[in-house]
């Protein structure tokens, strides 16, 4: 992927410092080691924008697509830029917070194959999202769908077992 990776690293470093985050704290927030943050801040060139860069974009409260904008010579986008195809924020309505990074990453990558919502009790439910990996072939996706259909019966029975239970 073309772009000014050295410039991106410098912009990330400056924004991280402005937020009072060490490389360790930024890494902890997104589930990577300090060395990964060092590599990015030193301007390492990647083949494409990685999930780690997406997570940094979110933690620094940049608008969706800011990484690409910076690589193209621009500045980070405001956080309220709507509808960018590069990142989808998954907010929890109950607390206004966000899902954990690993869950958010899993939800944004690959192809959504199916979903299920199963009641666990009168006041709780389980949400299942079946995702195909980004690089999965058509045959692999079809095999995954078959496996999901076979396991779906277990989940339905789980829902039946928990109906009528109280929290």
Image (cartoon, rainbow, N blue to C red):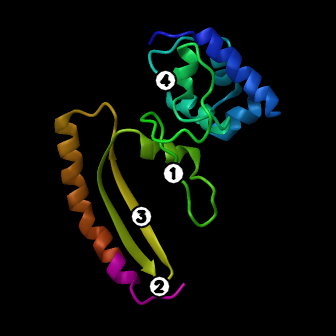
Left or right, 90 with reference to 109: right
Q: Residues within 10 Å of mark 4 (few under 14, many from 20)?
A: some
Q: CA–CA distance between discs 2 and 3? A: 15 Å
Magenta highlight on residue 122: no
Circle 3 or circle 4, nearest the eye: 4
Q: Mark 3 or mark 1, which has the lower sequence index? A: 1
- Can I make out residue 38 in this image? no
Circle 3 or circle 1, nearest the eye: 1
Magenta highlight on residue 164: yes
Q: CA–CA distance between discs 3 and 1? A: 14 Å
* x 58%, y 50%: residue: 100
Q: Secondary structure at mark 4?
A: loop
Q: Mark 2 or mark 3, which has the lower sequence index? A: 2
Q: Secondary structure at mark 3?
A: strand
Q: CA–CA distance between discs 4 and 2? A: 42 Å
Q: Position of residue 90 (x, y in %)?
A: 51, 51
Q: Mark 3 or mark 4, which has the lower sequence index? A: 4
Q: Position of residue 38 (x, y in %)?
A: 69, 18
Q: The magenta stretch spans which residues?
A: 159-167
Task: Say which mark, if any, is on residue 90.
Answer: 1
Q: Is residue 117 above or below residue 110?
A: below
Q: Secondary structure at mark 2?
A: loop
Left or right, 143 with reference to 95: left
Q: Quadrant of residue 128?
A: bottom left
Q: Residues within 10 Å of mark 2 (few under 14, many from 20)?
A: few
Task: Say which mark, if any, is on residue 49.
Answer: 4
Q: Mark 1 or mark 2, which has the lower sequence index? A: 1
Circle 1 or circle 2, nearest the eye: 1
Task: Say which mark, if any, is on residue 130.
Answer: none
Q: CA–CA distance between discs 4 and 1? A: 19 Å
Where is mark 2, residue-wise? 122
Where is mark 3, residue-wise? 127
């Amino acid at each position: 992927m073309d772009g000014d990776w050295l410039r991106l690293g410098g912009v990330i470093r400056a924004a991280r410092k402005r937020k009072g985050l060490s490389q360790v704290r930024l890494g902890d927030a997104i589930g990577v080691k300090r060395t990964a943050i060092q590599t990015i801040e030193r301007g390492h060139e990647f083949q494409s924008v990685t999930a780690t860069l997406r997570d940094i974009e979110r933690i620094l409260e940049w608008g969706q697509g800011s990484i690409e904008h910076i690589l193209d010579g621009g500045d980070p986008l405001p956080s309220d830029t709507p509808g960018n195809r590069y990142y989808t924020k998954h907010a929890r309505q109950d607390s206004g917070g966000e899902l954990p990074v690993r869950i958010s990453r899993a939800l944004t990558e690959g192809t959504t194959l199916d979903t299920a919502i199963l009641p666990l009790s009168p006041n709780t439910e389980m949400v299942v999202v079946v995702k195909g990996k980004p690089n999965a072939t058509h045959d692999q996706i079809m095999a995954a769908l078959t496996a999901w259909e076979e396991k779906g019966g277990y989940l339905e029975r789980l829902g039946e077992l928990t109906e009528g239970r109280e929290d």
